[in-house]
Image (cartoon, rainbow, N blue to C red):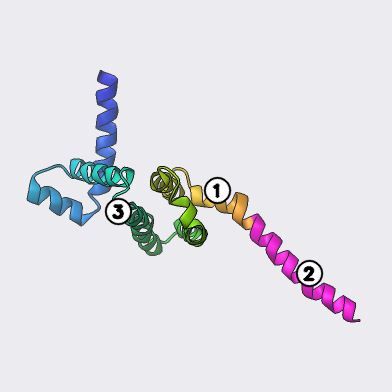
């Protein structure tokens, strides 16, 4: 039991430190008297329940995929290093491609059970600094496809030029 309590305290402290950077979380705690960690957990839990029940799931998932990433991107722009800039730029490339693909397959995906829950998990995986999913997906799949497409387009004019001579 002490191990569980120690783990809880560790994660609680980490979450409290992260939320301390957000003025809205501080204001929430001051006005309600409820810990900002419990408030954020409650909001996340209600949001997850709504996504699970498919009540406004599309809006909630897309707001999550856009909202946090936009905030983190603006923070990354303000830092002097370039590594976080590259992480978020890569995220936006993958997120944009995913949304285009979803637009054309949305009528099929809607019938997939728990689609929005899976999409939420996928977007969190893409965004999470611990997993760097967007970078993994970009380097293992998108980049090779783009290079192949670019090389094949460059060779088409060269072949046409060679035939005309």
Discs 1/3, front: 3
Badge 1 or badge 3: first in the primary sequence: 3
Which one is in front, 35 or 125? 125
Q: Measured from the top left, where is residue 13 in percent x and y?
A: 25, 37
Q: Is residue 63 left or right of residue 165?
A: left
Residue 14 sits above or below residue 73 on the image: above
CA distance separating discs 1 and 3: 30 Å
Residue identified by numbered label 2? 155
Which range of residues does the magenta coloring cover?
Answer: 144-165
Task: Please name the predominant secondary structure of the magenta segment in the image.
Answer: helix
Residue identified by numbered label 1? 136
User: Can the viewer see residue 83 in this picture?
Assistant: no
Q: Measured from the top left, where is residue 56 in percent x and y?
A: 30, 53
Residue 152 sits above or below residue 30 on the image: below
Badge 2 or badge 1: first in the primary sequence: 1
User: Can the viewer see residue 160 in this picture?
Assistant: yes
CA distance separating discs 3 and 2: 47 Å
Q: Residue 143 magenta-drawn?
A: no
Discs 3/2, front: 3
Residue identified by numbered label 3? 56
Q: Residues within 10 Å of mark 3 (few under 14, many from 20)?
A: few
Badge 3 or badge 2: first in the primary sequence: 3
Farthest residue, direction top: 1
Q: Residue at x 61, y 52 (%)?
A: 141
Discs 2/1, front: 2
Query: Can you tell which quarter of the image residue 118 is in?
Result: top left
């Amino acid at each position: 039991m002490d191990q569980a309590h120690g783990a809880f305290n560790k994660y609680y402290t980490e979450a409290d430190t992260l939320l301390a950077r957000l003025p809205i979380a501080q204001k929430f705690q001051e006005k309600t008297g409820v810990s900002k960690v419990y408030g954020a957990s409650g909001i996340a839990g209600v949001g997850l329940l709504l996504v699970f029940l498919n009540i406004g799931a599309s809006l909630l998932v897309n707001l999550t995929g856009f909202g946090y990433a936009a905030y983190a991107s603006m923070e990354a722009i303000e830092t002097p290093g370039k590594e976080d800039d590259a992480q978020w730029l890569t995220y936006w490339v993958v997120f944009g491609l995913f949304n285009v693909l979803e637009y054309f397959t949305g009528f099929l995906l809607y019938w997939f059970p728990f689609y929005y829950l899976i999409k939420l998990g996928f977007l969190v995986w893409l965004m999470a600094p611990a997993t760097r999913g967007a970078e993994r997906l970009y380097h293992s799949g998108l980049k090779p496809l783009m290079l192949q497409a670019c090389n094949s387009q460059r060779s088409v004019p060269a072949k046409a030029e060679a035939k005309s001579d």
